[in-house]
């Protein structure tokens, strides 16, 4: 897979399941990351072909719980993002999925206590030897690209030094979220500090943070010098952000997302979470569309509520 000049859907827990990835790709995303899955969890799964849906599922053994679902259509662009703190375990997990995905990415930016206490996510940023161990082990033993996603360190010099060490492991690209570990999502992303990393490296850098409109793709590229851009919240709110023709009305995107969720039998919790994020941004959970999502117990309920809602709106 090539990493230059790409529009990238960011990894997002609870959001980045198969229907959302296909939605983003339909509107123009070139590369779509799956939600972070912890290596321990994948190792408890078995690979199953789902003849009914036409998908490949990684299902927790002895249960019906699908940890990761993918399909042939996205094979050349889907990135499996893993949470890990151990090279051997990461490799064992990566070997389970490597024939079904385009690349493996290691999450080195998650600041949540669950990740940090397990030595994963942003905890890795202060352990360059472990980073080296994980990335070189994956790189040596896998035939698909290996990448990682980091946050900024406390000084730009420190970030650049770490990025240079990471580049030496031979990975194919580095995604940089332009926020520091203590920063909150409302704090502005520091595009100038991403620029320092881009200037120091030869491998493609994927710039991430505060891209909310199609025009922002060009702005962040010019400011950082990166040729590829990754979007998270801007894509949840309206996945047609990737379209050069401009955003579609969010109701249309929401309808298409519900359709895809049903088609691919998405986890209801993931579908509800994603729809709630869209509704909170554009509307309100107390209005009929919000209440319809909250009340839905399963995908059938959701479909019914929205059919009724939409025919009611047409009637008005
Ligand atoms: C709902 C949600 C879930 C996220 N899950 C992940 C994840 O699984 N792995 C990861 O590396 N980053 C995750 N992130 C961080 C995003 O990938 C991204 O780095 C961050 O939101 C900044 O991009 P933005 O300004 O476009 O939102 C998540 C962000 C959001 C909003």
Image (tube, rainbow, N blue to C red):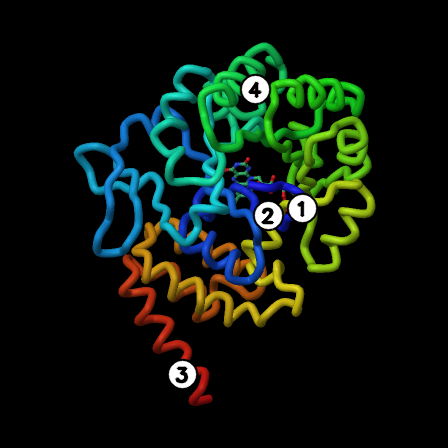
Q: Residue at x 46, y 22 (%)?
A: 84
Earlier in the chain: of badge 1 and badge 2, it is 2
Residue on which disc 1 sits? 229
Determine which of the numbered discs, if any, sits on residue 123 in the image: 4
Q: Nearer the viewer, residue 203 or 185?
A: 203
Query: On the picture, is 149 further left or further right than 187?
Result: left
What percent of the width, then of the height, locates residue 222?
82, 47
Within the image, what quadrant is residue 312 found in?
A: bottom left
Which tag is nearer the camera, tag 3 or tag 1?
A: 1
In the rendered image, the quadrant that contains the N terminus is top right
What percent of the width, then of the height, locates residue 147?
57, 30
Secondary structure category for the residue under label 1: strand
> Alpha carbon of mark 1 to alpha carbon of mark 4: how far?
24 Å
Residue on which disc 2 sits? 8
The answer to whether mark 4 is within 8 Å of ligand 1 is no
How many numbered marks have been drawn onto this rendered protein structure? 4
The answer to whether mark 3 is within 8 Å of ligand 1 is no
Asked if the residues shown at circle 1 and circle 2 are in contact, with their CB atoms under 8 angstroms apart, the answer is yes
> Alpha carbon of mark 4 to alpha carbon of mark 2: how far?
24 Å
Q: Is residue 131 above or below residue 302?
A: above
Which tag is nearer the camera, tag 1 or tag 4?
A: 1
Mark 3: few/some/many CA within 10 Å (<14, 14-19, 20+): few
Q: Residue at x 58, y 24 (%)?
A: 122
Mark 1: few/some/many CA within 10 Å (<14, 14-19, 20+): many
Instruction: Specify the quarter for ligand 1.
Output: top right
Secondary structure category for the residue under label 2: strand
> Alpha carbon of mark 1 to alpha carbon of mark 2: how far?
6 Å
């Amino acid at each position: 897979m090539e990493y230059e000049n790409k529009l990238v859907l960011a990894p997002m827990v609870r959001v980045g399941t198969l229907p959302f990835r296909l939605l983003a790709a339909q509107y123009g995303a070139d590369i779509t990351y799956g939600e972070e899955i912890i290596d321990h969890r994948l190792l408890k799964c078995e690979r199953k072909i789902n003849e009914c849906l036409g998908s490949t599922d990684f299902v927790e053994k002895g249960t019906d719980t699908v940890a990761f679902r993918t399909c042939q259509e996205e094979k050349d662009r889907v990135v499996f993002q893993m949470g890990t703190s151990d090279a051997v375990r990461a490799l064992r997990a990566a070997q389970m999925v490597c024939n079904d995905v385009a690349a493996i990415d290691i999450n080195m930016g998650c600041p949540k206590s669950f990740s940090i206490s397990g030595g994963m996510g942003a905890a890795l940023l202060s352990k360059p030897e472990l980073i080296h161990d994980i990335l070189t082990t994956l790189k040596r033993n896998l035939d698909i690209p290996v990448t990682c996603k980091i946050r900024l360190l406390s000084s730009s010099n420190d970030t650049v030094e770490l990025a240079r060490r990471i580049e030496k492991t031979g990975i194919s690209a580095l995604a940089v979220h332009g926020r520091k570990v203590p920063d909150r999502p409302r704090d502005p992303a520091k595009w100038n500090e991403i620029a320092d990393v881009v200037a120091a490296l030869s491998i493609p850098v994927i710039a991430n943070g505060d891209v909310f409109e199609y025009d922002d793709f060009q702005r962040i590229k010019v400011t950082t010098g990166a040729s590829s851009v990754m979007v998270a919240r801007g894509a949840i709110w309206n996945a047609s952000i990737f379209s050069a023709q401009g955003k579609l009305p969010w109701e249309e995107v929401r309808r298409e997302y519900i359709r895809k969720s049903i088609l691919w039998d998405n986890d209801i919790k993931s579908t509800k979470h994603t729809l709630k994020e869209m509704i909170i941004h554009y509307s309100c959970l107390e209005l009929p569309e919000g209440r319809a999502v909250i009340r839905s117990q399963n995908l059938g309920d959701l479909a019914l509520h929205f059919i009724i809602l939409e025919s009611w709106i047409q009637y008005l």
